[in-house]
Image (spheres, rainbow, N blue to C red):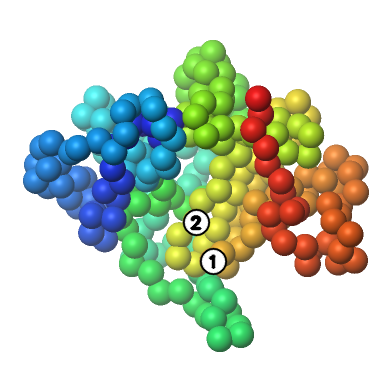
Amino acid sequence: LLEHTSGIPDLFGALPEAPLLQTTAEVDRLLSERPSIPLGTAPGAEYVYSNFNYVLLGYLLRSATGADWESYLRDNILEPVGAVDTRYYDVWSAVPRRARGYEWAEGGLRAVETDDHSAYAAGGLESTVDDLRRWHEGLHRGDFFPLPLLGAALEPNEGGYGQGWQIVRALGRELQNHTGGIGGFASHIAWYPAEELLIVLLSNVEGSTVKALACDLARLTLGMDPSPTSEPDWLAAPAAERCVQEPLR
């Protein structure tokens, strides 16, 4: 499931928008309605990114621990490392200093109204740059599970994907990274292990080229020419040209 090679069809879109505990009930309903789900490919045969894989992992975690997704994260991951501003995203709650999401439309920025609650274990978290740094440091200290297990998760498999991470070569270096986004927001986390360089980008503008911006920041931090093209304005270059990612091996 973490490698996205399960072959299970992506049923994420079949989950209605609902708060966390109701989403759990909706997963129950969906699985009871479909006790047998035909596989699209044989397990382990092909990489196909699927948010439903993450939903199933959260569902399994609840079954194994008896705790709901948010409570388990808070008690075992977030609070121990001091990530107190990270929580499951509830669009109806009043959260101090929470950013509002926007999108480009009709030549300008327009606020995005969202009631999307259904991300469940496929995302649906709100956080800060500092909290993600604290989580990253805890992860690489072995606070959550043994470091050999983390090492296995960061080995590229089908599609250059490990277990929850994309592992590629960028700027001539190994890069462990992932991008995310929902309506009104875009995010990217990038870790260059040899250089011990962590870059976290959180944007409240939907569709922001966060992956390219992370590569731009890496170039500047590592003392490289910021422009991968002959464009006079390097930010005007297409995002794909500014952040070329290749298979690690």
Quadrant the C terminus occupies: top right
Which residue is labeled 1 in the image?
206
Mark nearer the N terminus (1 vs 2) = 2
- Image: 26 above or below 73: below
Q: From the viewer's perspective, is 128 left or right of 35?
A: right
Q: Mark 1 falls on what kind of element?
A: loop
> Residue 159 in the image: x percent, y percent?
52, 34
| Residue type at numbered disc 2 | Gly
| Residue type at numbered disc 1 | Glu
- Label drawn at residue 181: 2
| Badge 2 density bin: few <14, some 14–19, many ≥20, Cα 10 Å | some
| Badge 1 density bin: few <14, some 14–19, many ≥20, Cα 10 Å | many
> Residue 202 in the image: x percent, y percent?
60, 55
- Image: 12 above or below 49: below
User: Is the C-beta separation of discs 1 and 2 under 8 Å?
Assistant: yes
* Residue at horizontal 61 percent and vertical 44 percent from the top: 189
Q: From the viewer's perspective, is 156 left or right of 7?
A: right
Quadrant the N terminus occupies: top left
- Image: 88 above or below 74: below
